[in-house]
Amino acid sequence: MLNAEDKMELRKLIDINIKIKEIYDSLREMEINYKTESKIFQNKLHILKKLVLAENKIYEMFKNEPEKIIDAYNKISFSSESLFEMNVLTELDDVANDYSENLVRTRIANHLLNLFLNSDESSMELANMPFNIDGKAYSQIEICIQTDYVNTVLTILNYYINDKKYNSIRNLLLRIKDNYAFLHEEIEFDLLEHNMQINPNLNWKTKIYADIAGLDEWEVDQIAEGLGNEVFDDKIMDIITIEEEELGDIEACFQYYLAQVLVRSSMLFLGEENARYLQDNFKLNATNEKCIVEGEKLTDLAARGQARIDKVLGMYNEDKKLPIIYSTRRNN
């Protein structure tokens, strides 16, 4: 059980994380205006690093005390199961809409979860936990896959951030980057060490952890494929259904191109055979020319949707060439 001192430290964590989120937001404002080399940006980045160090010192107080970690986790998280189940779409909703309170709570819960899984007694404790998991190793693999997926999203997102064609939504794209870094400890560490610049390579770590833990490669691939399917099935609809005239609206335009990034990323987790099958066989069928939907023929709507699908699925050919480095750290 948490004692009075533990509860006070948890309160400190919340306060520090609110400050960290505020600095992320101010750094983003400067990045929007291309001021990442300015003295003000560097000073704020230094303050951010100091706050992260102070945050980590508080987590040290909970280290190797799994019962306290669990109690703290249950107090701060939305559900006792949420972080043990890969729910990238729920996380995405908070990231894309910048729900600060949710992001702060999820960041703390993520840190506590990692602390718990790395504690000496976590394997024993997992046997009695009410989570939908299959042991410590697979819990860590799920987290690895989710981190690899977010790294992939950021690498592909970077092309849109740096393309002037998307300048009208650049601030929203940068918000995605910063909020994902805020939630994922290893991604944050990487960006802080590289002036908040996204890694141009794909640093994937799942294979490393799976090999170390001796996990079945097919089972790990199935978990990754499940994540890819979940995102693909949800976000392909945004690409199909957002109307052409809506793309003049900043928010609709942002959702459309974000869906492109997410679908492209998901394709890299489906496996080569499944990705190629989708490229060849994902077809919209509409033959009734008399059917009118909001003043437009259904067949015309389907043709436009199919052209969009073919375009984004075709991007897999280039995304497949992205350098994949099986490492937990950027090389340079």
Image: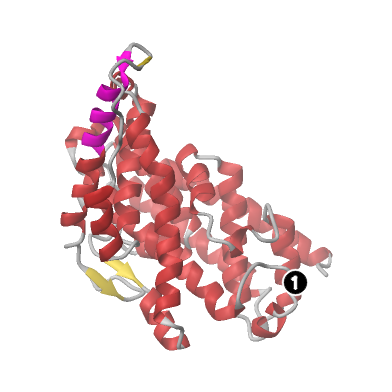
* Residue at (68, 78) in percent of width and height: 126
Q: Is residue 118 magenta?
A: no
Q: Which amino acid does label 1 sit on?
A: Lys
- Is 32 rendered above or below residue 182? above
On-image quarter of the N terminus: bottom right
Residue with the mark numbered 1: 68
On-image quarter of the C terminus: bottom left
Q: Position of residue 98 (x, y in %)?
A: 50, 40
- Is 94 rendered above or below residue 143? above
| Main secondary structure found in the magenta portion | helix
Specify start and end residues of the magenta stretch as a single range.
Answer: 296-308
Q: Does the magenta stretch include residue 298?
A: yes
* Residue at (44, 59) in percent of width and height: 227
Is residue 186 visible in this depiction of the protein? no
- Horizontal side, residue 255 vs residue 23: left or right: left
Q: Where is residue 50 in the image (x, y as percent from the top left)?
A: 49, 61
Q: Secondary structure beneath disc 1?
A: helix
**Viewer-proximal residue, 126 or 10?**
126
- Horizontal side, residue 289 vs residue 241: left or right: left
* Residue at (33, 73) in percent of width and height: 329
